[in-house]
Image (spheres, rainbow, N blue to C red):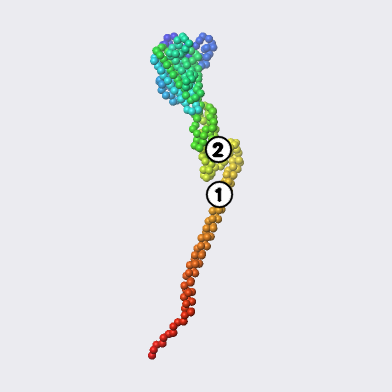
Amino acid sequence: MTPRSWPARPQRYAAARTPSSRAGRSQVVAGVAQTPRMGDAPGYEKRVNKLCSVPLRQREGYLSSPGFPHYYPALTDCVWHLEAAQGQTVHVQMLDVSMRRPAPGPQDCVQDLVSVSEGSNPLLVACGEELRNLRSVQSVSNRLEVRFRASEFVPNRGFLLRYRLVGCPTPGPPHQGYLVHRTPSSAEYKCCRDHVFADTLRDTRTLHCVDGNAWNDSVPDCVSRLELALNGTLLAAEDDPGASDQALKHRSEMHLSSLADILVPCLIMGGLLLGNAVVVLVIFRLRKRRIARLRARLPTVALLADGESKEPPPAQRPQA
């Protein structure tokens, strides 16, 4: 097959390498039927990243060697980092591999190769045009590295793969709360002591990952029970998620009764103290007025007593 006669679709690249056995053909059809075709998907070629060592920030996409589906250049060494958020993993599906065949020897894929690694652990190393290269790998952590290396020019296409981020990213812990447990499909959060989630009035919340990419709920901040009670918004905080309305109402009445047991004695004591203070003040004012009246009357009584005890001097008669 000459380079000009190569078809333009990745599916047929793999079909050109199909062995003559029926088993081999069925594997190729099953493995490539899921790959999108450039002619059928609008903007397919625009979604394929052909640039060397550029950051990949999309949730899913396609990655290929420079020049794909034509010849890849010589002296190429490209590295791409596929990084997801905490709690997510990275899935890579190799769709097409067409490179120089490895030299005979104990070591395969020494000169031209594409590799997918997780840290120092190689998950996939492909070269040549073998059907076993068309497989999928998935990381355990949230990071994968794809490396493409070409030592010299050869009339081969290179590689094409599809990547996607799997799972829901782990939400941050709420204020006055923390993450209790995390699985690929769920996350459990709990509020600190005497704190609850304001929307449910419970101290625990479990999120479930829906369709492998979104949580069914959010994680609001935790608020103090005392603050809710003072604001009049605290109704109940049952530990049993299946509590009935009657149980919630009963719990609310208990909270209000406890609050009344504290406030009523305080109000009574305050009223008694205020009443005693008023009585003392009235008595003090009455005594003060009585003393003032007595002091006002004492000088008049003293003058009258002095006038009665002393006789007036005899009147002098005028001399004739």
Give the amino acid type for the residue marked by disc 2 in the picture. Answer: Arg
Residue 231 disc label? none
Q: Which residue bears the numbered disc 2?
A: 202
Residue at 50 percent across and 11 percent down: it is 18
Q: Label 2 neighbourhood size at 10 Å, few (<14), some (14-19), many (20+)?
A: some
Q: Which residue is mark 1?
A: 263
Q: Is residue 122 above or below residue 255?
A: above
Report how far apart the C-alphas of labels 1 and 2 lie in the structure. 26 Å
Label 1 Cα crowd, 10 Å radius (few <14 / some 14-19 / many 20+): few
Where is residue 261 shown, x and y percent of the image? Answer: 58, 48
Q: Secondary structure at mark 2?
A: loop
Total residue callouts? 2
Q: Measured from the top left, where is residue 65 in percent x and y?
A: 42, 17
| Residue under the image location 49 percent in, 23 percent down | 90
For the residue pair 267 and 14, the one nearer the viewer reads as 267
Residue drawn at 48 percent across, 74 percent down:
302
Q: Quadrant of the N terminus?
A: top left
Question: Is residue 41 something that shows in the picture?
Answer: no
Callout 1: helix, strand or loop? helix
- Answer above or below: position of 151 versus 211: above
Comes first in the chain, label 1 or label 2: 2
View extreme (bottom): residue: 320
- Residue in the picture at 55% in, 53% down: 269
| Residue 29 image position (x, y, % from top left) | 51, 15
Q: Nearer the viewer, residue 3 or 168?
A: 168
Pick the front one: 233 or 239: 239
Label 2 near label 1: C-beta < 8 Å?
no
Q: Which percent across, then down, holds residue 230? A: 52, 45
Specify whether residue 285 is in view. yes
**Looking at the picture, which amino acid does disc 1 mark?**
Leu
Split into 4 quadrants, where in the image is the C terminus? bottom left
- Label 1 vs label 2, nearer the camera: 1
